[in-house]
């Protein structure tokens, strides 16, 4: 079983729609959580960190549920430019590597 | 300023050939990471350097993979006797912060195809 699991999609949504992605992680020792964005044939870039209390950055909202070991990303009012792969990332405590999920592909359609 | 650069951007190798992939991190960044990203997968950690010291190589898949950063700046990932399963994008990332934190700046990657 992969440490970080995501639905690969693709999620095809119209412009203006709200879309949500979930991610589950298997290791309860995971301490830090992030969403990265990766455009087609480009490098990953940090989108946002995920805090226990939930956090928002413009149209993006991230939530963490430690009891159920899942993380979510909600995108409101989708734009064509949101089309990308969204990578769920977890990190254990200490000097340990980032662990990436496979990513969820989003296509926003005009 | 300049970001992380990698060369070559594309490499085609015959099975059994040795390859060397180069990473130029952002100037002054102490931490450097290598990842392997197979098609349809997320990046998988290979190794981490703090300055010239290789502090974590737990992700290297076999002893055919070797990485170095002799002067604490440029790094080279070498793959000996390449196999078809080595075909992937090899991503380098760097960070100004010591340790394996989340703020890593990725390069564009080297796309390796082993025939």
Image (spheres, coloured by chain):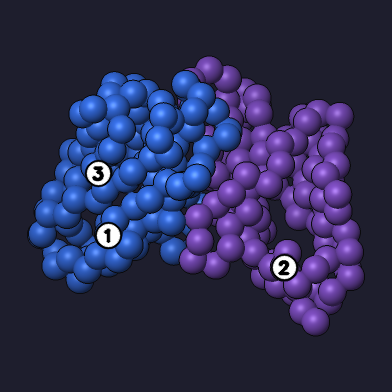
Chain colours: A purple, B blue
Residue at 25% from the left image edge and 32% from the top image edge = B69
Residue B40 versus residue B26 in the image, above or below = below
Crowd around label 1: few <14 · some 14–19 · many ≥20 (10 Å): some
Is disc 1 placed on a helix, strand or loop? loop
Choose mark 3 or mark 2, whichever is in front: 2
Q: What residue is disc 3 on?
A: B77
Q: Compare residues A34 and B8 and report the one nearer the observer.
A: B8
**What's the mark number on residue A81?**
2
Q: Quadrant of residue B93?
A: top left
Residue at 62% from the left image edge and 44% from the top image edge = A46
x then y, percent, for residue B51? 33, 24
x then y, percent, for residue A26? 62, 36
**What's the mark number on residue B95?**
none
Is disc 2 placed on a helix, strand or loop? helix
Residue B7 versus residue B2 in the image, above or below = below
Identify the subunit bearing mark 2. Answer: A
Q: What residue is disc 1 on?
A: B8
Identify the subunit bearing mark 3. Answer: B
Q: Compare residues A106 and A40 and report the one nearer the observer.
A: A40
x then y, percent, for residue A13? 80, 73
Q: Residue furthest front?
A: B1
Q: Compare residues A1 and A51 and report the one nearer the observer.
A: A51
Crowd around label 2: few <14 · some 14–19 · many ≥20 (10 Å): few
């Amino acid at each position: 079983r992969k440490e970080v699991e995501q639905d690969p999609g693709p999620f095809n949504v119209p412009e203006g729609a709200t879309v949500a992605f979930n991610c589950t992680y298997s290791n309860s020792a995971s301490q830090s959580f992030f969403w990265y964005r990766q455009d087609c044939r480009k490098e990953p870039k940090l989108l946002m960190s995920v805090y226990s209390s939930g956090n928002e950055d413009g149209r993006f909202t991230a939530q963490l549920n430690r009891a159920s070991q899942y993380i979510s990303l909600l995108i409101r009012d989708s734009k064509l430019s949101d089309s990308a792969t969204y990578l769920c990332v977890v990190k254990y405590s200490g000097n340990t590597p980032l662990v990436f999920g496979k990513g969820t592909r989003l296509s926003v359609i005009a | 300023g300049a970001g992380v650069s990698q060369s070559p951007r594309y490499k085609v190798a015959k099975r059994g050939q040795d390859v060397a992939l180069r990473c130029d991190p952002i100037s002054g960044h102490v931490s450097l990471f290598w990842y392997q990203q197979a098609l349809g997968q997320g990046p998988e950690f290979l190794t981490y350097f703090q300055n010239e010291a290789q502090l974590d190589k737990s992700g290297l898949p076999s002893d055919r993979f070797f990485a170095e950063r002799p002067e604490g700046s440029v790094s080279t990932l070498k793959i000996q006797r390449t196999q078809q399963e080595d075909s992937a994008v090899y991503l380098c990332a760097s960070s100004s912060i010591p340790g394996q934190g989340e703020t890593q700046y990725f390069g564009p990657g080297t796309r390796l195809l082993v025939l």
